[in-house]
Amino acid sequence: MTQSLPDLLRANVRFLGRILGDVIRAEDGEAVFSQIEEIRQASVGFHREGTEAAAKLMADRLGGLSPPDTVRFAHSFACFLQITNIAEDQIQRRRGRGGDTRSDTLAGALRVLKAQGVGVDQVMALLEGALVAPVITAHPSEVRRKSILDRQGAIADDLDAYDQAHADTDRARLERELMRQVAIFWRTRLLRNVKLGVGDEIENAVSYFERSFLPELPRLYAHWLEVLGEPDRLPSFLRVGSWVGGDRDGNPNVTEAVMRQAMARQSRAALRMYLDRIHQLGAELSISASLAGVTPELQALADASPDPSPHRADEPYRRALTNIYARLAATYPLLTGEPPARRAAGPAQPYDGPDALRGDLQTVLDSLLTRHGPSFARGPLPDLIRAVEIFGFHLARLDLRQNSAVHARVVAELLKGAAVCADYEALDEDARCELLLAELSHGRLLHTPFADYSEETRREYDILTAAADLKHFYGRDAIRAHIVSNTTSISDLLEVYLLLKEVGLFTPGDPARTQVFAEPLFETIADLRAAPDIMRRYLALPLIRQLVGPVGIQEVMIGYSDSNKDGSYLTSTWELHQASLALAEVMRDSGLRLQLFHGRGGAVGRGGGSSFDALLAQPQGTIAGRIRITEQGEVVANKYADPELARQSLETLAAGVVLASLRKPAKSELAAPHAGIMDGLAREAMSAYRALVYETPGFVDYFFAATPISEIADLNIGSRPTSRQAKRSIEGLRAIPWVFSWSQSRALLPGWYGFGSAVARSGAPIEKLAELHETWPFFSSALANMEMVLAKGDMAIAGRYAGLVEDRALADHVFGEIRAEWDRTVEALLAITGQSALLEKNPDLAAVIRSRLPYIDPLNHLQIELIRRRRAGEDTEAVRDGIHLTINGIAAGLRNTG
């Protein structure tokens, strides 16, 4: 009989929890273990009984802790929640091994499509022009150190081996190994003692490639070839990108030196793997010329080898591979700045690009297939060729990003210094565009090395100069996009081309050419509404038609985080939906394909939730095989730190894109019939949300007092400041700490606020909304994400955070509004979904969340007490560490928090 998810999770958690308990006993003594266990049992009892007596018992246990005991307790519960995550991930790995029976695999998508009359040939046609690209960012909501992630990986590997072991002796040995790994984990510092720099973020990002993407993506393609019936060719449509080292929006620490460091580190990871694989192939392919022939092309490659060894004189494959190795080893120091770990057999010419390397490897494979048949069509050599095709010499395409306001200031300074325009920023939009188009029509440059520019202008010029160098060294695919944050006009995009022209990445002429494309990012509700008109006028410019026409694709990035912070979860979700539809129409009218870049975060308030469901909920015709999606914060580690989970996540993404692009939706799934209802809901949700967040006097003070935002700012979790401005305001605060703070306080306001009022005020009948929930993926997905948020929230705990606000009248008023809206939202959600309790129809998820709460809630109570002490003047190291450990533990328990 198959065990349920809650039963499996309970068994795994008990097993790992027992081992952690044994470690605590062995290392800290029975008294410490008993103290921790008493608090744990008190919290479990409180959740089972919910009585005042149980609550008082838990409060007494927590209140009696000394400062050192407080730190130790917070550390232990944070560790236990990390252990719970390992146990949950193990179940996901186990279920993923069930083969291709799930719908969120490519095989599952093919079955669904076949039932609708869509064949494999149509899927292959889609994939020929497809691009599916998760993009790794350094946005700071990942509180775990890399050392902790590494230890979790080691424990997960041992747990996996234990799970698959059969003999008692093997299990005993593996349990001892688990004990050792958990002991190391227990004594590993959870908190960073210094602030992360961009270099650390680069290292962290590349580690996901080394551990997961580099080995797993080629294997996934090999699997897909089988699923698709062994086609002659499967394009490398799924690739992984990065912002780490190229995203300088609000981060002055990203410099040209940092960007060069990022690309060199990325290249080092790719080339090291290629060199290792080539060396292994050379050891394996010991085929002798006296026993088997080779193709003339392979023989020529072998003859060019610098390997002088007589022992390999009659082994053409080995000689060919030593030649390839020598050439790549000669390339390695040019791109990484260091020698390869293993020397080549002799000197050789470096490769001028990854295509030449792939060509030589293909020569080896062609000879093997010609002389030895299809048994070589799968294996390490085809996987290596696929890896070179995917990752090149640059590993991941690095996006540039900067705020439009910075571009405007830099362009203004360049134009003034060249005596072209004394005050560019004073011009209206039409005059700006006219001037920019004139400057883009000729080859004269504005920048001169003799001028004394501002630091900002020098920094931007140096970054773009470095980008031109990196494209030359690492290949045309190393950098392709320059994303413009806060795009509100056509001139915001033209300014980028003017700056690219200064470094040779844009070339005027007839036709004009560009090596990097300016791409808009529409972020606020107003920006999303204006996006279709801006893009229609932008694409009508003859210059832009010259640049984009040959490619046939225009990418547009849409931001989930800031639109949510601007106008509420429901309004943001709907406006993103409508903007996507309108942008798709603009592209069709312009004869182009739309490529949406979804700027999603981990939390529901930043676009998080199930990627597969989100893809199926996208408006019809807005994906069409091409999509990019940011992967941010703790979600990156949750999805990609483990190779097996990474492979599952990547396949889910690909399957979702194929299914969303080709499936035939029912009429009830189309948005048009429901637009009126959704417009009304979105309007009322935004009104309620903005009335609280932007129109309530003193709300900023409430937020900074009733959440740990100030304490989060002290955490060493990212290189970017938490706010764009020195002034304390909601507008200036970045969306990530905004969402993260509400998650910590268990109000999780960005993921639901305004929905209850929207339902009550819009006049939409509950019966009609219930029908939409049953038949429309967009609406059901939006409500499912919101329901998960509400299930993780706790108004009683949020009320205790409100107790941190010194102005009691303000606290009572604001929290009263939040509590009332919470009640309205839960009531409306239950009525629409036909439930008597949250997650009643999703008992597995309910059980998973419920199992964590006895370990999360005490950390919240402890955090409140420690924040109160710190703000009262007890700003000791123990208090600060205790606060930061509780933040760490709560984030681990809630998982998708930032």
Image (cartoon, grey):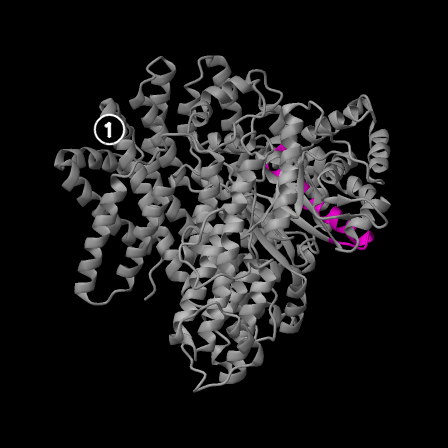
Residue 298 horizontal side relative to residue 890, left or right = right
Residue 20 position (above or below residue 210): above
Chief secondary structure of the magenta portion: helix
Residue 676 horizontal side relative to residue 328, left or right = right
Reply yes or no: does residue 603 show up in magenta: no
Residue 259 position (above or below residue 668): above
Q: Nearer the viewer, residue 480 or 320?
A: 320
Residue 383 horizontal side relative to residue 585, left or right = left
Q: Nearer the viewer, residue 135 or 66?
A: 135
Reply yes or no: does residue 592 show up in magenta: yes
Residue 105 position (above or below residue 469): below
Give the amino acid at mark 1: Leu
> Which residue is located at x 25 percent, y 46 percent?
182
| Residue 727 position in % (x across, y down) | 57, 17
| Residue 145 position in % (x across, y down) | 38, 39
Residue at the disc numbered 1 = 57
Q: Which residues are magenta?
A: 567-593
Residue 147 horizontal side relative to residue 830, left or right = left
| Residue 536 position in % (x across, y down) | 81, 44
Q: Looking at the rendering, in which quadrant would you find the N terminus?
A: bottom left
